[in-house]
Image (cartoon, helix red, strand yellow):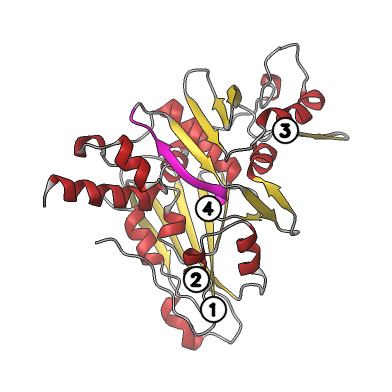
Amino acid sequence: MSAGGRLTDRIRTRCLYTGESPRWLKGSLTRLDNLRPIPDADESQALLESRVMEHLAHGGAYFAHPFGIARTRITSDGETIVHLDDRTVSESGDQHPMSTYALDCLLPTRGKGIYVPRADDLRMTVIRNTDLGLTRNGVRTLVLRRTAGTRWRSELADRESPLRETDDDSLTISMGSRLTWHWERLDLAWLGSGLLRRIALFHTSSSAYRVTSWRQRREWIFELDTRRDVPLGHDVLLERLMDRVWGLPLRIQRASCTCGNDGSRAEGTMKSCVFCLVHTGDRVGVLQLRFRSVPGAAGDRATLQRVSADPAWLDRVLPAQGESSALEVPA
């Protein structure tokens, strides 16, 4: 294969993993040696990215892309830019800008006698147009990028006064005196960062129309809901996650798959396949993937249309009755 052909294949594969725009990749990484597989973050950067991933993925809402993250861009100089969707719809049906949702996930919350620290170790570094810079230690940074028209400053100003507790002149996402730390966060940083950098896999390599996530100590759990008449298709996602070149160093530790047991299940019961993945080496942490076959609600497709979900993706994960669904498999 020619160098041009190899470059095209790498661009296509990287788009599958990161959600990146092919046009941007072609324009910014024009040489084959510049388009290496997705790099790992160092320990400090990995912890920052993992914390952002943890909190953005924790809320229950409807998104056009997994957790409202359209793509994760790793620039040639190593900067991490997380591109957010335009908006999201909550469980109650209320529509919000993704900037509002992101700040609700990351900023501490104060009520009468209640303080919820959220991402209590993050600080803001810069607010520029559609970009909001985040850091943990003032050295490593991550940029949240929203669509044109985003007003980070006005949204932050609404939250600043009731949250300020110190004499520090800088606006912080949390107060250092409130810092609570758990070693489990550091242990799973490699996993959270690795998944954030491959966030598009939940969109391109899964038949799930909705993904939710939470953590339990040293285990990170993802539930992927697929409508009952659509194949779960978990093999594609697992294969790409564990790919030796583009994926993470993961192996299946244990699995419980019910895909072949449809005939033995009562009508109306939920089918679920669970896979627990661990590091191929000695890193601590478990990634638990729960692929669930669910009835789905009549309004799910309409809700996802409200957040401008891609019509082709909707036809694949929530096809009209009588239509088939299939995952794209790269050549």
Q: Residue at x 78, y 19 (%)?
A: 165
Give the magenta part as a residue range: 66-76
The residue labelled by disc 1 is: 320
Q: Are marks 3 and 2 in contact (CB under 8 Å)?
A: no
User: Which numbered mark, 4 or 1, is in the foreground of this view?
Assistant: 1
Element carrying mark 2: helix
The residue labelled by disc 2 is: 315
The residue labelled by disc 4 is: 66
First in sequence: mark 3 or mark 2? 3
Element carrying mark 4: helix
Amino acid residing under circle 2: Asp
User: Which numbered mark, 3 or 4, is in the foreground of this view?
Assistant: 3
Amino acid residing under circle 3: Glu
Element carrying mark 1: loop
Instruction: Tell me if residue 280 comes above or below residue 163 in the rendering.
Output: below
Q: Give the CA distance from mark 3 to mark 1.
A: 39 Å
Quadrant into which the C terminus falls: bottom left
Amino acid residing under circle 4: Pro
The residue labelled by disc 3 is: 155
Instruction: Tell me if residue 234 comes above or below residue 269 in the rendering.
Output: above
First in sequence: mark 3 or mark 4? 4
Q: Give the CA distance from mark 3 to mark 4.
A: 23 Å
Horizontal and vertical percent for residue 297?
Answer: 66, 72
Q: Are marks 1 and 2 in contact (CB under 8 Å)?
A: yes
